[in-house]
Each structure stands twice: as structure tokens, then as C-alpha cells.
Amino acid sequence: MSSTPAATTATRAEPPVLEALRVTLADGIATVTLNRPDKANAMNWAMWQDIRTAMQWVDRTPEARVAILDAEGKHFTSGIDLTMMMGLQAQIKDDCDGRSREKLRQLVLELQDTLSSIERCRKPVLAAIHGGCVGGGVDLISCTDMRYCAADAYFTIKEIDIGMVADVGTLQRLPKIIGNQGIVREMAFTGRRVDAAEALQIGLVNKVYDSREALQSGVREMAALIAAKSPLSIRGTKEMLNYSRDHSVADGLNYIATWNSAMLMSGDLMTAMMANMAKQTPQFKD
């Protein structure tokens, strides 16, 4: 039997048309592409909104079993758009200083929520990174499930160089990804570049590919492996991994016991068991 996921043609679920992103769907794999190559994919207001829209679409679309986050142009992203940054003062302006500060806080929370939509998406999101991944780009990829890069990729927590504290997720998520407080603090305090080889060494990325073409091919191959698995089990696995990252072992064990008391006896379980007995490749419902 074919390993291609059953009933996952692009015509069944029309991807959204967005201003700063391009979204496609084929063979169970949604590809979400940062699409401002002339601006080094700087993250302007439209892109922030589009990221949430795209992730919500992936989450709600049964035919999308896994997502790849990549980018057009020379760089993955140069980070937050400086024009957007300069416009913040007018956006939060108020006669009352307290209300102005409240507006700024709400704005930061909204940007945080945009990136958290990647974690909330029940489908795995794989980042394919080439060129520069700067500032807000590190916040962005820190929300993904796995990160892969081309040999030309580099990463920098750039906020320190513009006189601010990174505030949309890097300082909270990166220590849990890398697991080395010293390295994270060094990156955050200095803003230095981490090249692809070092990113692999410290655990920021899963694998480095020789070229951008090899990166795209390799990540799509990994996504296809995930898309062929039980969608219900994949969604539950992401839920458990995210929960266990932020809770104790005892809490995680209790949660999975409750989860599987509801989800274990599924059609996917029977499909997988029957296919294994018949030495066939299982085909799962979206």
C-alpha cells in the first residue's frame, strides 16, 4: 500500500491568501512561507497577523497533518520590522501615561500570542532556516517543534543591540531548547552570531544541510514521515510534550493517563494494528 496519507489533496482545503506569507498544502504537508524577500522578510505588522492566521488554519484543517515554516529570499528573517518599531509611539499614544503603558503591554502580549499560536497548533511545525535568523526570528523558531538549517544559516538575539530586552519568547523558550543557561545568556547579553555548526552543537537545530535545496528536500522528507503517522496520535504527542515541558513528571504522567483513557481506543489504533499484522503501511483518516 502507498505511504501517502489518504485523502489529502490540496483541493479539499483551500489555503488562505495572505499579505506577508504564502501558504500551500500538498500530501498532508502545509508549507507556510515568509514572503517579504525584498525586505529580508522583516516581520511587519501584516506578517505578525498572518502568522497567527496561518497557524490557526493549519490547526483547523484536517488535511494539514504537519507544517513546514520556511522563507523566500536570501534570509529567513531579519527580525521585527524597524518601521513597525518606530511607529509604536504613535500607536500607544494617550494623554494618560498609565493608559499609554497599558496599551504597550497589550501590544507586547498580542505579539507574544501570535508566536504562541505555533505552539497551540496541534500539528507539528518544522522550521527550515537559511541565511540570517535575527532577533524576532529566533523568537519565531523557538516556538516550532523542530528546527533544521542550511550551512549558511546564522542566529542572533539582536534585541540587545537596539537597547531592548527580547520580549516575545526567546528568553523563555530558548533555555528549554538548548538546556545550557550559560550559552543562552552569552547569546542574549552579547547579540553575537551563532553559525549553523554551533547551532547544531548546542542543540538549537536538529540537523544542518549543505545547501538550501538539500534543506528543503530533507525537511519535506521528515514532514512526510510525520504526515504518514496517525494524526490523532501525533496531535496527542505534541500536546503531551508541550505540557510535560512546563510541568513536573508526576503531572505529565497523570495527564497522559487521563488523555489516553479518552483517546487510546481509537480507529487509528485498530488501523495500525491490522496493518502491522498484514505487513502493510497503515492509512489513517485525517
Image (cartoon, grey):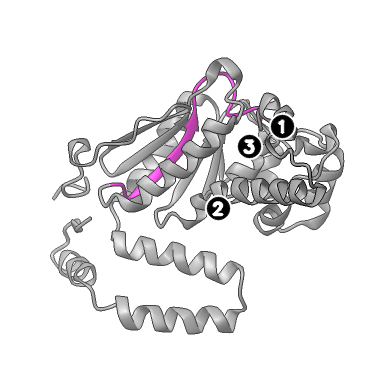
**Is residue 168 something that shows in the picture?**
no
The residue at the point 49 percent across, 40 percent down is 51
Q: Nearer the viewer, residue 162 or 96?
A: 96
Q: Residue at x 19, y 39 (%)?
A: 9
Q: In the rendered structure, which amino acid carries the disc numbered 3? A: Gly
Secondary structure mostly taken by the magenta-highlighted segment of the chain: loop
Q: Earlier in the sequence, mark 3 or mark 1?
A: 1
Residue of label 3: 137
Q: Quadrant of residue 259?
A: bottom left
Magenta includes 24?
no
Q: Name the residue at 52% across, 31% down.
A: 46
- Earlier along the polypeptide chain: callout 2 or callout 1? 1
Q: Which residue is tagged 1?
A: 90
Q: Is residue 124 left or right of residue 192?
A: left
Query: Residue 193: x and y, percent?
Result: 77, 33
Q: Amino acid at mark 1?
A: Ala
Q: Is residue 158 visible?
A: yes
Q: Nearer the viewer, residue 95 or 194?
A: 95
Name the residue at 60% across, 21% down.
Answer: 40
SS under mark 2? helix
Q: Which residues are magenta?
A: 64-79
224 or 286, nearer to the observer: 286
Label 1 Cα crowd, 10 Å radius (few <14 / some 14-19 / many 20+): few
Q: Quadrant of the C terminus?
A: bottom left
| Kind of residue indicated by mark 2 | Ser
When the figure is inspected, residue 250 is found, relative to residue 39, above or below; the finding is below
